[in-house]
Amino acid sequence: MNIVLGVGGGIAAYKSALLLRLFTEAGHAVTVIPTEASTKFVGVATWEALSGRPVTNDVFDSVDQVNHVRIGHEADLIVVAPATADLLAKAAGGHANDLLTTTLLMARGPVLFAPAMHTEMWQHASTVANVATLRSRGVLVLDPAVGRLTGPDTGPGRLPEPEEIFAAAMALISDVPDATPVTEDAGSPAPLSTEPEVAAPAAVVPTEPAASVPDTSKRINGPLSGVRVLITAGGTREPLDPVRYLGNKSSGKQGVALAEAALAAGADVILIHAPMEVPAPAGASIQRIETALELRSATLAASATADVVIMAAAVADFRPANISTGKIKKRDNADDPIIRLVRNPDILVEVVAHRAAQNQKQLIVGFAAETGDDQGDAQAYAQQKIVRKGCDLLVVNEVGPGDSGDERVFGQDTNHVEILSLDGASPVQSDGSKREVADAVVHLIAQRLAAG
Ligand code: C5P
């Protein structure tokens, strides 16, 4: 694929070097277009060395090749990372005053923006309106990650991790045939100028492994061969201040077991996970997130091309209304702090709604950790939940202390579940290790897909 990587003028521009490497290692040809301002953070020489092709941001370079028209036309995908508030505004307003903005205006393929800016800029009414305009046109604008920003401030505004941007980008083009190798043959974009290649200065070459790129040579032939399965796992963390968060007891073990079971059945697995106690399995495409809002943007992007979505993540229903920029202090003469919470979106419900809006053929599986109370037992609550959420299957486990007084599910290696069907088919029970339960879920999914 021909990918254009637009780089905006923000300190996070250096992270795009890792993103570029993920693209090239996956076999894509990448043309980098840095804005003028971004070259103050990362120089043209770095982009040329890492992409293996000349780089410019000047519309008047190589005018004979009509670059400002050609690059956008030939791009299978345009990714802008970091996308500054200024670039979002220019794209929403249709400006075309440099090579990146003209390329964006020429684009007819998918476009992804990965914003990075200070929280105030991201939350400013102008940026909110520009993002809404772009999204209404079908442009994928990721939500920025929440965390420490360049100065002492903390909040939404960090560039999402390169692996997350990579996975969202791959999801956008995944229904198009496999990546073409990077060559200078016909079909690859011509160089932007005739400057010679520059060797990469050792210090700028990213050394982290491309953890999210699965090894497709080890694909297994099984009941889910060729099926794209998106799995969410782990427990989200909702920050309160730079060092504290609201979390939950999810270990991620059941989600990882599901990913392993789906891989063993031959599926192409995308695992989007919040923090977990266990490592993510090899062979899956991995995206790590922290918060429910990050999980939401990653899941909605990846679910657009998934045949099966399994939502095993324990998502926080609420997040702190405000994230303190400094550590919340305990002061002897001050009142204890009161934390106001706001509701997180229900991602499972949104995935179901998107499927309907897109008229997409997709099997959606939810999870429910239930406890009974004096109003009804866990099964009765689960039955209401599958109807309310609208997912095809709901894997229900009763959580809380068992007869021995110990927790039955969270952090344990075994599980006991009942799998409910929206279509009223009899519930299926599964008991055993989390992997055995995962195999039972995958078996049921394969049966459903086979039945059409
Ligand atoms: O409502 P409850 O948390 O019990 O629903 C559990 C199911 O819904 C799980 O599949 C979980 O991943 C998903 N969920 C979600 N978004 C939320 C809360 C839960 O997608 N905000």
Image: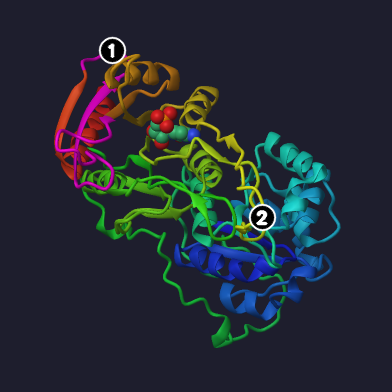
User: Which residue in the protein does label 1 denote?
Assistant: 424
Earlier residue among tags 1 and 2: 2
Point out residue 261 in the picture as x, y percentages from the top left corner. Answer: 23, 45
The relative height of residue 64 versus residue 444 in the rendered view (above or below) is below
Query: Would you call the spot at circle 1 few (<14 residues within 10 Å), some (14-19), or many (20 or more)?
Result: few
At a point 66% along the width and 55% down the height, the residue shown is 333
Nearest the camera: 318 or 133?
318
The relative height of residue 293 versus residue 67 in the rendered view (above or below) is above
269 with respect to 158 (left or right): left
Q: Is residue 185 visible?
A: no
User: Which residue in the protein does label 2 denote?
Assistant: 333
Magenta region: 397-426
> Can you tell which quarter of the image residue 157 is in?
bottom right
At a point 44% along the width and 22% down the height, the residue shown is 389
277 with respect to 14 (left or right): left
Instruction: Tell me if residue 406 is in the magenta stretch.
Output: yes
> Can you tell which quarter of the image residue 388 is in?
top left
Q: Main secondary structure of the magenta part?
A: loop
> Can you tell which quarter of the image residue 361 is in?
top left
Q: Quadrant of ligand 1?
A: top left
